[in-house]
Amino acid sequence: MRRLVVSADEPDPVLIAEAAAVIRARGLVAFPTDTLYGIAADPRSDEAVARLFAVKGRDQGVAVPLIAADVEQARAAGDFGPGEMRLADAFWPGPLSIVVPAARVLSQAALGGHRTVAIRVPAHAVARAVARSFGFCVTATSANRSGAAPAESADQLSGIVRGLDLLLDAGRAPGGPPSTIVELAEHGPVLIRAGAVAWDRVIKSLR
């Protein structure tokens, strides 16, 4: 696994482009987010998603979340209604993942057999730059073996995950809880996973 050191605030576009090229070639790239380190792969590629699941030892029935560079990129991967856009306006960039109907271009393997996908725009320059340079959303599942503690730093990651192609080392990630995951169902908002954004803040933003 190659390791590239990048600035957390102003990542070198040349290094980010290298990471994007690896993802285009169906590779796996570890990168920092505004919570923990994640693993980026092309969510449209069955081959890349299969590699991702193998590296993590992940249950094939568990969907993979995505990150986007901005709202417009997120909307290319999922169908955002008025309610979802209110959440995006209120909390992005930030650690709130919104579950929406998935675009047909996404690999069914990435959806874990479902028809929805969780997407967010992170508050981390490196993460957004990777998605922007790649030109589409990338996966953002935590950089660890499934069931193990997620990595908050590049040094931690290199010791617990094997089979990655590239590591973008931007120092320690903020850590803390993972992103909160919410879905706007027919009967109202549903908390899929508690996380960094408090549930009461989500509810208040929809009133």
Image (cartoon, grey):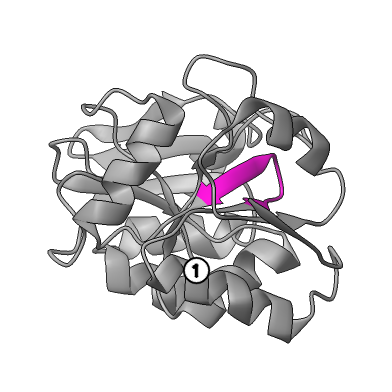
Frontmost residue, 55 versus 132 = 55
Frontmost residue, 61 versus 18 = 18
Horizontal side, residue 45 vs residue 126: left or right: left
Q: Position of residue 7 (x, y in %)?
A: 86, 67
Q: Note whether 156 is above or below 26 in the view shown.
A: above
Horizontal side, residue 78 vs residue 204: left or right: left
Horizontal side, residue 66 vs residue 174: left or right: left
Q: Which amino acid, mark 1?
A: Val
Q: Is residue 100 magenta?
A: no
Q: Where is residue 50 in the image (x, y as percent from the top left)?
A: 27, 43
In the orientation shown, which residue stands out farthest toward the top? 147
Q: Where is residue 43 in the image (x, y as percent from the top left)?
A: 31, 58
Frontmost residue, 39 versus 75 = 39
Please indicate, yes or no, whether residue 63 appears anywhere in the rendered image: yes
Label 1: which secondary element: helix
Residue found at x 29% / y 36%: 63
Residue found at x 66% / y 34%: 196
Please indicate, yes or no, whether residue 207 appears anywhere in the rendered image: no
Residue found at x 71% / y 66%: 126
Number of marks in picture: 1
Q: In which quarter of the image is residue 175?
A: top right
Q: Note whether 65 is above or below 58 in the view shown.
A: below
Q: Note whether 49 is above or below 88 in the view shown.
A: above
Residue found at x 39% / y 42%: 52
Question: Which stretch did the figure color magenta?
Answer: 31-39
Q: Position of residue 187 (x, y in %)?
A: 21, 32
Q: Residues within 10 Å of mark 1 (few under 14, many from 20)?
A: some
In the orientation shown, which residue stands out farthest toward the bottom? 14
Q: Quadrant of residue 159?
A: top right
Q: From the image, tell me which residue sits under label 1.
A: 22
